[in-house]
Image (cartoon, helix red, strand yellow):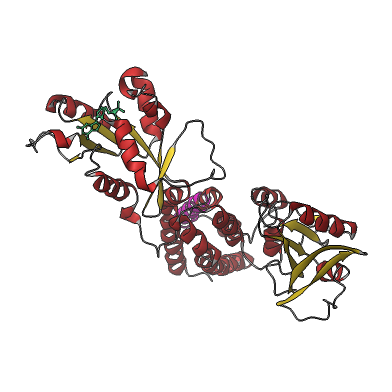
Amino acid sequence: MLGKLAGWDDTIAAIATPQGVGAIGVIRISGAQAISVVDGMFPSKSLEAQASHTLHVGLLKEDALVLDEVVVALFKAPRSFTGENVVEISCHGSHYIQSQVMESLSRRGVRMAKPGEFTQRAFLNGKMDLTQAEAVADIIASNTEASKKTALQNIRGGFSSVLKELREELIKFSALIELELDFSQEDVEFADRTALFDLLNRVSVQVSKLLQSFRLGNVIKNGVQVAIIGKPNAGKSTLLNALLNEERAIVSDIAGTTRDTIEEVLNINGVLFRLIDTAGIREHTSDIIESIGVERSLAKMREADVVIYLFDITTTTPEELSIEQAKLAAANIQYVMVGNKADQVKERNENAAEHVLYISAKENSGVDELKHRLFNLTVSDEWNSDNTIVTNARHIDALQKVEKSLYDIRNGLQEGLPGDLVAIDIRSCLHYLGEITGEVSNEDQLDFIFSKFCIGK
Ligand code: GDP
């Protein structure tokens, strides 16, 4: 565990509520001086004399000037989010008032907090491990039930507790193997090799489970990319409207994703489905396959997690359909073949193509079934809310390194490598495991992680 970094003993403050005018604005202050500083602005009683976890109503003043009537919440170290003294001042939502309060605080030596600094302090004070701290950012960014649930699970400890246990077991082995090195002349084995292999297997199973969960984690965090493709007049824009009819999701930009195409988003069972390149569909330059060339349409499809291939059943021959289906299959893309304008056809040759879903986009029939299929294809196989799901690219990177070092350790043991070399591999495995939970970390890495937070968190 990293010790406290330099410059962490000052007191920081930030407006914790979003910009703009709300009914209430909350200013959060953390640090050794938090309570005494606010005490100096709160004449009606001595805040320092009050118990932790209490609320106090009164006037907040800068000398004779009344800043606002406020509610002050007190959290005394170490029983606070950051582990330091924390004061939360709820004032009226006026931006003017909040800036005045911030100015007064700064006149008293309180510094404006950097993004994520409150959470970073919570981490440095051992209030949470790194995965939990990162989940705080995820939960703030969450915009569906599924992403909230995953983030909440990680805030509560999620998979880091499992990894910590395994890491501790591995530390014991590493100690035993290093002990053997001290007795190298005597050819003794303190570390039971069978038990070590068993432990390595358990770590491997856990790590590969977590690695596998990332695909789903990514889906939950960033959504599923869906491309609707098909010839002109197949009914793509009609379908788009039908899909978006009720479920259009309200989303803001998801942190870390930049997009140059216009997209519409729908929410199916708590997971976001992003309909990509909808601008193209809307503008009726829609035939991706024919108008922009095979290369680009393939690229578009590869970008998608799933493709809806829409065709007009009144004009498409079974031969054409098989050709399109073969192309999709060859490109190794998940797809749903959707036959549109079912309202136009009384009897259908069900054998025309396999796995075709028939809908009428115009009459909105079959559209729910299509949503159901999209969800099943991309999410539901692995969907189990009890499973631990990794959503963070940094964790995946570390987990991949753990996997590699596990392989090295196992290989080393099998080939009878000298203990000191095996010990090096074990140490590197311990290092990467520790990186995930933050037992091993460095200042740059922490700055990077916390800089992605918003100010006030
Ligand atoms: P796009 O070029 O693929 O975007 O196709 P559009 O959505 O513009 O639809 C082309 C034409 O087909 C329009 O006249 C639609 O009203 C019509 N259309 C779309 N879906 C259906 C449907 O389910 N049934 C019928 N009968 N017509 C449809």
Q: Which residues are magenta?
A: 400-414
Residue 307 point in image, percent of width and height = 32, 36
Task: Name the residue nearer the viewer: 408 or 40.
Answer: 40
Residue 342 point in image, percent of width and height = 16, 36
- Is any part of residue 277 visible from this angle? no
Quick check: 265 above or below 7?
above
Q: Main secondary structure of the magenta part?
A: helix
Task: Name the residue nearer the viewer: 133 or 453.
Answer: 453
Q: Is residue 411 magenta?
A: yes
Quadrant location of the C terminus in the rendered image = bottom right
Quadrant location of the N terminus in the rendered image = bottom right
Quick check: 132 above or below 401?
below
Residue 24 point in image, percent of width and height = 68, 61
- Is any part of residue 152 visible from this angle? yes
Q: Is residue 362 left or right of residue 42?
A: left
Q: Quadrant of ligand 1?
A: top left
Task: Name the residue nearer the viewer: 446 or 209.
Answer: 446
